[in-house]
Structure formats: structure tokens, C-alpha cells
Amino acid sequence: MAGNGPERRNRSGEEVTDRILRHKIKLMSENIDHQFWYNMRSGAVEQGMQSPSTDRVGPFTTREEAVHALAKLRANSAKWAAEEAENER
């Protein structure tokens, strides 16, 4: 689209304009206080961004999801390792 800055594409290949990016950033910042993070250093679940980004993973929609963050990280790692191994064949 002309006038919207350089062309960008998301992972699905769809064009992402500056207007869309600003809208998404606004939505994300409005929801941060209502999201949950898992603190890797302390093992605590936190609501909102309370700790430095180097210490936490997330965001998660619910406290329950954040409680199970390590299991999700392990599952994702195993899935990605299997996909990489499959792609190398």
C-alpha cells in the first residue's frame, strides 16, 4: 500500500502496514496488566510486567497457563527438535 511505509509481511505472508502495527502495539500495551508471566529466576507467576524481561517468559492469558510455563517450554522445544530432525532427513 502506498504511503504506509516499507512493505512488511507477517509469518503468513500477509502485508502488515504501519497502521496495523500501531494498532497491534496499542492492543498489546493495553492488555499487559491483565496478562501473566512466569519468572524463571524465582519460579513465581506474576501479573503484568513486574520483573526484567531477562527473568520472565510469557505472556500467558491466564495464571494457570503461566503456572505450567516450563512444561509448555519443554513441549515446544521437543516439538521443534523433532521438526528439525525431520527436515534434515
Image (cartoon, helix red, strand yellow):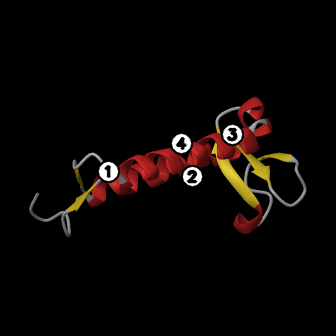
Question: Residue at 73% across / 39% down in the picture?
Answer: 71
Percent x, y of residue 72: 67, 39
Mark 4 to mark 1 CA distance (whole Å) = 19 Å
First in sequence: mark 2 or mark 3? 2
Q: Residues within 10 Å of mark 1 (few under 14, many from 20)?
A: few
Residue that mark 3 sits on: 34
Q: Residues within 10 Å of mark 3 (few under 14, many from 20)?
A: some
> Which residue was labeled with disc 2?
29
Which of the two discs, 3 and 1, labels the residue nearer the N terminus? 1
Disc 1 secondary structure class: loop
Residue 74 placement (x, y as % from top left): 68, 45
Q: Earlier in the sequence, mark 1 or mark 2?
A: 1
Q: Is residue 62 left or right of residue 19?
A: right
Depth check, mark 4 against mark 1: the one in front is 4
Q: Earlier in the sequence, mark 2 or mark 4?
A: 2
Q: Earlier in the sequence, mark 4 or mark 1?
A: 1
Question: Residue at the front extreme?
Answer: 89
Q: Decide if residue 26 is on the left or right side of residue 22.
A: right
Disc 3 marks a residue whose amino acid type is: His
Distance (Cα) linking label 2 and label 4: 30 Å
The residue pinned by badge 1 equals: 11
Q: CA distance from mark 3 to mark 1?
A: 26 Å
Residue on which disc 4 sits:
79
What's the distance in space between the residues labelled 1 and 2, CA to CA? Answer: 21 Å
Q: Secondary structure at mark 4?
A: helix
Callout 2–callout 3 Cβ contact below 8 Å: no
Tag 1–tag 2 contact (CB < 8 Å)? no
- Name the amino acid type tagged 4: Lys
